[in-house]
Amino acid sequence: MENFYIISDAEKDVGYETAEEIKRYLENHKKCATIVGDSSQIPEDAFVELAIVLGGDGSVLQAAKRFAGKNIPILGVNFGTLGFLTEVEKPKIKAALDCVLSGQYEIEKRMAITGQVQKKAVGEAISLAINEFIIGKQDFGHMMTAKVYVDDSLVDTYVADAVLVSTPTGSTAYNLSASGPVLVPGMEALIITPVCPHSLNQRSIVVSSEAKIRIEVGKTKENYKDEAAIRGDGQMLWTVSTGDVIRIEKAEATFDMVRLGDVSFFDKMRSKLNRN
């Protein structure tokens, strides 16, 4: 590898101090390195062989969306709290760079998902998510009803605060907080998790990554429509109401994460999730 982009969160890497240190280290090894504050600042035609992302999971998510389908691997350096998507903690940056420069790393391809909303009044819109799509109630104190289908077969009708569909990468995000299962990131599967369901026997369901998921917004009470908000990776995307349909499936594009191999997924899970 010869061409590196360093994407640094200026709020966490004050004055780009660490980014500049990485840039000097790479240039001392005869490599080309460019610092940007955001992945959107990288030109579409830029030659990028590796993106080093300094920040938390949010920074990595943004870069993953930007580089999905472009075969540009991402090395995440944790400047946040949990940093589940990052591979390296800040004190070990130079050791990680040495591994990259000597070819001692692997590329792990991970799946993303697409969400498409069909509204009678507006038509269709589509978006990409790395972690999850959340279809959640819009008003505090009200439940929402959602009919969930997998490959046109009814799974269940949920009366709940929300229904989320997550990837294996996103299994340790909102899905985990909602008591959903944790999946190994390289798996090919989708998780459907009801959030605060109005039932004791409704739990998460894991389905094939090839499944086509359809969620229809129902009607909890006869005298008003259910109103719901759809978020992808925490970003507000659309509002929907009774009768609208959301379709979610595996995206064609994958995104690439650098794995160094010194810390396994299970090591990371124990260290980050068992904190006091």
Image (tube, helix red, strand yellow):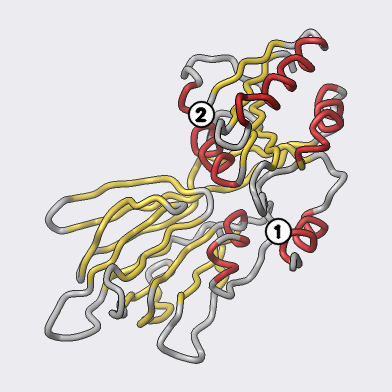
Percent coordinates x, y for residue 158 in the rendering: 38, 80
Q: Residue at x 45, y 55 (%)?
A: 249
Q: Using the rendered view, name the quadrant where residue 216 is placed.
A: bottom left
Q: Please name the residue that numbered disc 1 is placed on.
A: 184
Question: Who is closer to the viewer here, 200 or 82?
Answer: 82
What is the secondary structure assignment of the residue under circle 1? loop
Left or right position of 142 against 211: left
The nearer-to-camera label among 2 and 1 is 2
Q: Earlier in the sequence, mark 2 or mark 1?
A: 2
**In the image, residue 127 lies at what x, y percent?**
37, 46
* Residue sitting at the far top: 30
Left or right position of 41 against 237 = right
In the rendered image, residue 133, in percent from the top left (x then y), is placed at 43, 58
Which circle marks residue 217 in the picture? Answer: none
Q: Which residue lies most toward the front here?
A: 14
Vertical relation: 209 (above or below) 191 = above
Where residue 171 sits: x, y (%)?
60, 62
Residue found 48% across the figure and 46% down from its top: 251
Q: Which mark is residue 38?
A: 2
Q: Callout 1, which amino acid? A: Val
Q: Nearer the viewer, residue 167 or 276?
A: 276
